[in-house]
Amino acid sequence: MATIDQLKILIAIAESRSLSHAAEKVSKTQPALTTAIKQLESVLNVSLFNREGYRLSLTNQGNILYQKAKKVIELHQEFIQTAHNYASGKEERISLAIEASFELETIFSKLEPLQQRHKSTQIVIKQEYLSGPVEQIHKGEVDLAITPIQAEFKKNGELEFLHVSKGALINVAASKLVNKFESLTSVKQLIDTYQVVVQDSGSMTTGVNVGVQSAQRYWYVNNFATKLSLIQSGMGWGRLPEHFVKDLLKSGELLEIELNDYASRIEFDYKLIKRNDKLLGPVATELWNSFKKT
């Protein structure tokens, strides 16, 4: 079996093309390198170097094995570094529950460098709806969450908050649906037209139809993509994240519905949240602290 030391010697000789330079690089004597390469060739039953010229050069098979040896050493180093990271307390993974109306691109500038600095830590993002992110935090199923937090979710100071960004939900419908009405000014006119509602992925609003008037006909869906498809088709109306629909509003494919008795637009202040009684690991703490600087 080829050893890590033998592979390092193979790489050193291949890149130095000189036993003396390779010996300096790996801090061994030239005879030790010669012996190691002979043993490696014997184990592999392959000639790794041409020995006819003044300088050592790789055979065709030796060159292929040299390339693979570099990958093995990289993986070995990554293996050792990952073990060191875990030993120092770095997490195997951190998880974030993010309310689906949030524009994820706004935090890429924080996630990407974190991912590069901590390659042994997996970053898991879970999309949730309405009370879902807060419920995930309270249950301890995620480390952090991003949500347009409401006062009723704060639960006696159990959570800590940092500002992330602002956003909005806009009440929209397809132009062909709006054009069915001579003048659309009240939500009561839409009572027999299906309102498309995203279902709460948490349980905090169980039994409550959020934003739905009494006797309103409605569709229930479990994601914004399905909701958008139904609204675009003219099969219903409802609120969608502003970043979801801004291009469709510009093109006129969707229209913002402005009603006298129903808010056309709901503004949100998105917060990063964590539990005060749960100690975050080093990577999650670094992510949390990165939002303190903005």
Image (spheres, rainbow, N blue to C red):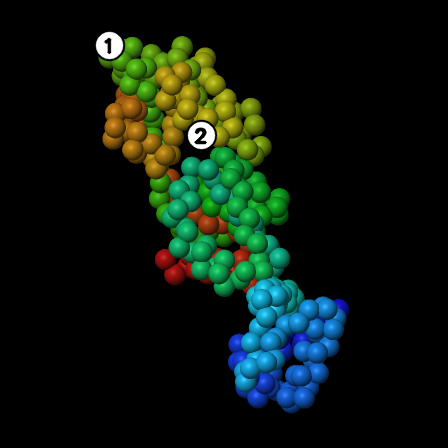
From the viewer's side, name the closer residue of 102 and 158.
Answer: 102
Q: In the image, which is nearer the foreground, mark 2 or mark 1?
A: 2
Q: Earlier in the sequence, mark 2 or mark 1?
A: 1
Say which amino acid is labelled 1: Glu
From the viewer's side, name the closer residue of 149 and 198.
Answer: 198
Residue 31 against residue 234 in the figure, above or below: below
Left or right of residue 185, residue 216 in this image: right
The secondary structure type at the circle numbered 2 is helix
From the viewer's side, name the closer residue of 27 and 224.
Answer: 27
Left or right of residue 178, residue 270 in this image: right
Whole-percent x, y for residue 216 in the image? 44, 14
Quarter of the image for residue 168 reads: top left
Quarter of the image for residue 54 reads: bottom right
Q: CA distance from mark 2 to mark 1?
A: 29 Å
Quarter of the image for residue 44 reads: bottom right
Whole-percent x, y for residue 257 in the image? 29, 23
Residue 116 against residue 54 in the figure, above or below: above
The crowding category of the residue bearing disc 2, from other C-alpha atoms within 10 Å (few below 14, some 14 to 19, many at least 20), is few
The residue that disc 1 covers is 182
Whole-percent x, y for residue 83 in the image? 65, 66
Q: Which mark is residue 225?
A: 2
Residue in view at x 33 percent, y 12 percent: 189
The secondary structure type at the circle numbered 1 is loop
Residue in view at x 50 percent, y 35 percent: 129
Number of dots carrying numbers: 2
Q: Using the rendered image of the protein, determine whether residue 151 is visible from the camera's viewpoint.
A: no
